[in-house]
Amino acid sequence: MTDKLSKKDGRLLLKLARENILKEFGKENEDLIDLKNKVSSLVLKEKRGAFVTLHKKGDLRGCIGTIDPVKTVWESITDNAKHAAFNDSRFSPLSYEELKDTSIEISILTRPQKLDYTDTKDLLARLQPDIDGVLIKKQYHSATFLPQVWKQLRDPATFLTHLCMKAGLSSNEWKSGNLDVFVYQVQSFEDGR
């Protein structure tokens, strides 16, 4: 597996995400066809987890992704851009008028690795703020935070508390020791609108 995408790959994927959102508004651009023809980078053809995050004037406006490498990077960004814009249940569908004020960020994930820990103190010590994305699982509950979430939740205990609540678990479930914890890293690109 190739680890890094080039800046050119990142620009291409950002354009792909925006063009696929425009396509849903009936504003299909010939650039979309040209983009597919420019895919020469092997990393874009790899199966990797990927997220697309939308921000409107700095506030979260949608975020959808896949952790497991079930689709190619190209396919994941294509699908997740549309879902982040129109199918994130936390938000109403994005309007065409909002798109001009919406920045797009894409995150390409490494394969999640199980984090073995002995107790609460050990778990907190093993997490790497600003580096690790964290996925938790317990029975049928699961949730993840991308590494970018560390910007809002700096303290590892607070980070895990919010992640447990996102998973529908008690806020202190991470202290029980009965939680499967996985970490991954991302390479992200943002179009900066």
Image (spheres, rainbow, N blue to C red):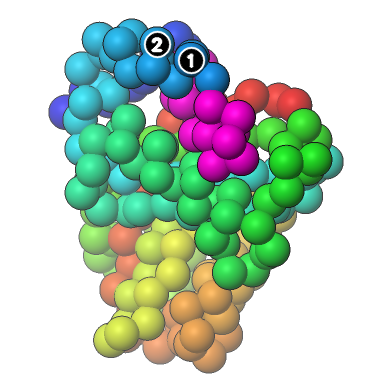
Q: Amino acid at mark 2?
A: Asp
Q: Are marks 2 and 1 in contact (CB under 8 Å)?
A: yes
User: Nearest the camera: 12 or 92?
Assistant: 92
Q: Residue at x 40, y 11 (%)?
A: 34
**Residue 137: percent from the left, percent from the top?**
33, 75
7 lies above or below 114: above
- Residue found at x 35% / y 53%: 66
For label 2, the SS is helix
Q: Is residue 170 magenta?
A: no
User: What residue does disc 1 label?
Assistant: 30
- 53 left or right of 123 in image: right
Residue 26 drawn in magenta: yes
The overriding secondary structure of the stretch rendered in magenta is: helix
Helix, strand, or loop for circle 1?
loop
Residue projecting furthest to the left: 1
Inspect the image, locate mark 1, and give the three-letter code of the amino acid beneath it. Answer: Glu
Within 10 Å of disc 1 (Cα), the crowding (few <14, some 14-19, many 20+) is: few
Q: Quadrant of the N terminus?
A: top left
Task: Using the image, tell me which numbered label, if any, was put on residue 34.
Answer: 2
What range is drawn magenta here?
Answer: 9-28
Q: Nearer the viewer, residue 65 or 163?
A: 65
Q: Is residue 40 above or below residue 180?
A: above
In percent of width and height, residue 19 lies at 53, 27
| Number of the front mark, 2 or 1 | 1
- Left or right, 8 with reference to 54: left
Of residue 30 and residue 144, the one placed in the foreground of this image is: 30
61 in relation to 90, above or below: above
Q: Residue at x 49, y 53 (%)?
A: 83
Q: Which residue is rendered at x = 64% and y = 24% of the image?
A: 191
